[in-house]
Image (cartoon, helix red, strand yellow):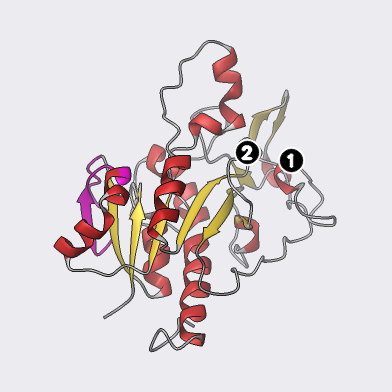
């Protein structure tokens, strides 16, 4: 039997697919139905309620999870939405992350908290920061500048390694955690900061919103390695599977090194 991971706020399964590739059996939890979810099982339920009654549910489901991944809504603490709030646009997304962390700590089970790097400082510890540039390899453009910070709780061994950020000529705010010569290979396509960029100087597409040169569905599918989603909003919200695969493999290798797993992901 594969080790079991719970993917809370799974949406269409970007994290789930990465954890499966790492070697997990993944059960997705989401308060909304998620047609086309690629995980091994899906349960429509409030994620906080699952954590509150975790042992009860695990008994009913007949599972003994080794990892709980949590991707709580990020809008409440995301500085990228500050301009919307300043214009009076209402943001009704609740701040669920602190309670999710508290409940997870009570359980004592290993967990991952994930948020955009644009979140308010102190939202989570940045135990690890991942960018798609670290994983794009020989993939041709268009690329996407997806950045995420991760906090790990009750981890069984050394934290996942921090990949080196590739060198590049463009250093935006998202690259500031990494020392030069870390940078992006070019600019993001479209109208940004009162400048319109296209062509070779703009090999990246914006993984959010519509219009103004923003990414098309096929471009995000290509850039993020996601071939089962066809909706632009789902793709914009998704975590690249390679992020979860990197973390999941590290986790399972730590268990294997301690003799708590028969085989490690390779």
Occupied quadrant, residue 152: bottom right
**Residue 42 in magenta?**
yes
Which residue is at the front of the view, 248 or 193?
248
Q: Which mark is residue 238?
A: none
Tell me the residue that label 1 is attached to. 173
Q: Are marks 2 and 1 in contact (CB under 8 Å)?
A: yes
Can residue 223 be seen from the camera position used here? Answer: yes
Tell me the residue that label 2 is attached to. 118
Q: Is residue 217 above or below residue 58?
A: above
**Mark toward the start of the polypeptide (2 vs 1):** 2
Chief SS of the magenta region? loop
Occupied quadrant, residue 79: top right
Which residue is at the front of the view, 169 or 256?
256
- Label 2 – label 1 distance at C-alpha: 9 Å
Range of magenta residues: 32-48
Question: Tag 2's secondary structure?
Answer: loop
Q: Answer with left or right where residue 56 lies relative to residue 106.
A: left
Q: Position of residue 262 (x, y in %)?
A: 38, 89
Q: Is residue 190 above or below residue 89?
A: below
Of all residues, the one furthest to the front in this rendering is 106
Can residue 38 be seen from the camera position used here? Answer: no
- The residue under the point 45% across, 81% down is 265
């Amino acid at each position: 039997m594969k080790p079991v991971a719970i993917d809370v706020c799974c949406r269409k399964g970007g994290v789930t697919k990465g954890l499966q590739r790492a070697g997990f059996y993944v059960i997705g939890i989401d308060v909304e139905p998620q047609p086309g979810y690629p995980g091994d099982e899906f349960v429509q339920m409030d994620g906080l309620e699952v954590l509150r009654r975790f042992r009860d549910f695990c008994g009913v489901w007949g599972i003994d999870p080794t990892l709980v991944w949590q991707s709580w809504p990020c809008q409440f603490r995301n500085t990228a939405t500050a301009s919307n709030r300043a214009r009076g646009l209402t943001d009704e997304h609740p701040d669920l992350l602190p309670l999710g962390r508290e409940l997870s700590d009570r359980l004592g089970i290993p967990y991952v908290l994930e948020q955009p790097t644009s979140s308010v400082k102190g939202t989570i510890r940045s135990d690890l920061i991942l960018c798609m540039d670290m994983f794009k390899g020989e993939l041709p453009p268009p690329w996407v500048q997806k950045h995420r910070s991760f906090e790990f709780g009750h981890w069984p061994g050394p934290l996942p390694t921090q990949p080196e950020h590739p060198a590049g000529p463009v250093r935006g705010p998202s690259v500031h955690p990494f020392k030069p010569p870390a940078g992006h290979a070019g600019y993001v396509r479209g109208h940004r900061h009162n400048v319109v960029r296209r062509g070779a100087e703009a090999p990246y597409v914006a993984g959010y919103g519509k219009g103004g040169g923003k990414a098309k569905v096929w471009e995000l599918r290509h850039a993020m390695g996601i071939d089962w989603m066809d909706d632009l909003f789902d793709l914009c919200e998704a975590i690249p599977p390679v992020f979860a695969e990197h973390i999941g493999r590290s986790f399972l290798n730590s268990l294997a090194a301690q003799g708590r797993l028969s085989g490690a992901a390779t």
